[in-house]
Image (cartoon, grey):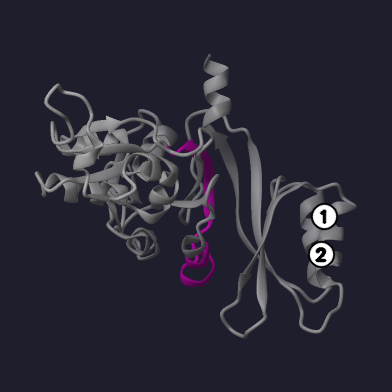
């Protein structure tokens, strides 16, 4: 049975993990902080870790990318896209008027993970602009804090699974500012694995460090992909943390590492004097594509 580290029970990460593995039996290890999720697998306590690395609204989760690059050596083994559906959650009956209707004026504080909070700011400004906003380690932690503080006017932004886990009620469903709010997750671990479901393709993630004092180096790197007609879905610069003004380039290539053209492109890039690190070559899964096929 696979053991997998993930953020606390009831988070979007937990929901996404259950979607990826379907009905397969798993040993799920919940960790409070993303650093603990990474270290659980890096130190051998679990086989894999679930890491959210990008969101439709907020973009890259820089802290998590930096952990993948600088803190651990864990290859990406799968990627999947999952909807981040957030809800306003509270203790039963706390935000109702005398007729049983929703009454937002009793909300004093709203708690959530900062990324989830940022996804729902329009809703908060419209319905409870006076409320104090407090960031915590996860949406599940926010729900648990609210559960333990009834009668104070505290509400949480979190998942339906989080509300069910802690026995709270959903005051308002789907409160994110945009309907197309999706999060990209990666499964990291030392070994490849077989997953249920049909993948939508294969992707290879690499890290390229350019040589110093080489005018046009980035252009030549991109040309190595372009003339071979290798499609890049993402390129992002991140500081090396070694010297001011020096950067890695995180690149996603829509091609498996076993293909004919990609290894040749990487060799050409290395010949330019660039350092190349392969972060993983892995199947990708898309929630929306799979749902469309089912319908």
In the rendering, which numbered label is found on residue 97?
Answer: none
Q: Is residue 170 visible?
A: yes
Image point (54%, 25%), residue name: 290
The range drawn in magenta is 65-84
Q: Nearer the viewer, residue 187 or 103?
A: 103
Q: Is residue 50 visible?
A: no
Reading the image, the residue beneath label 1 is 225
Q: Residue at x 62, y 33 (%)?
A: 200
Magenta segment includes 129: no
Which quadrant holds residue 10? top left
The local crowd at label 1, few if under 14, some if 14 to 19, many if 20 or more residues have their Cα within 10 Å, is many
Near-viewer residue (199 or 232): 232
Pointer 1 and pointer 2: residues touching (CB < 8 Å)?
yes
Q: Position of residue 158 (x, y in %)?
A: 31, 42
The quadrant of the picture occupied by the N terminus is top left
Q: Which residue is mark 2?
A: 221
Residue 234's x, y, as percent? 68, 52
Give the secondary structure at mark 2. helix
């Amino acid at each position: 049975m696979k053991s997998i580290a993930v953020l606390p029970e009831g988070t979007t990460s937990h929901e996404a993990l259950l979607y990826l593995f379907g009905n397969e039996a798993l040993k799920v290890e919940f960790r409070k902080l993303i650093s603990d999720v990474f270290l659980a697998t890096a130190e051998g306590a679990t086989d894999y870790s679930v890491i959210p690395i990008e969101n439709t609204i907020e973009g890259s989760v820089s802290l998590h990318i930096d952990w993948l690059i600088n803190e651990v050596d864990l290859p990406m083994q799968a990627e999947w896209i999952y909807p981040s559906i957030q809800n306003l959650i509270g203790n039963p009956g706390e935000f109702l008027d005398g007729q049983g209707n929703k009454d937002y004026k009793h909300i004093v504080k709203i708690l959530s993970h900062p990324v989830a909070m940022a996804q729902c700011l329009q809703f908060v400004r419209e319905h409870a602009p006076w409320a104090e906003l407090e960031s915590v380690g996860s949406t599940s932690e926010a729900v648990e804090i609210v559960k333990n503080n009834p009668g104070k006017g505290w509400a949480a932004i979190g998942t339906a699974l989080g509300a069910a886990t802690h026995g709270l009620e959903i005051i308002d469903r789907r409160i994110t500012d945009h309907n197309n709010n999706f999060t990209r997750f990666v499964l990291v671990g030392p070994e490849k694995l077989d997953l249920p479901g049909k993948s939508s393709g294969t992707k290879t993630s690499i890290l390229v460090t350019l040589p110093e004092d080489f005018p046009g180096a980035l252009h030549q790197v991109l040309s190595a992909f372009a003339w071979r007609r290798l499609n890049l879905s993402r390129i992002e610069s991140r500081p090396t943390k070694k010297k001011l003004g020096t950067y890695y380039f995180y690149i996603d290539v829509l091609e498996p590492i076993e293909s004919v053209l990609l290894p040749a492109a990487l060799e050409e890039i290395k010949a330019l004097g660039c350092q190349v690190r392969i972060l993983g070559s892995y199947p990708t899964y898309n929630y929306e594509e799979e749902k469309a096929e089912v319908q």
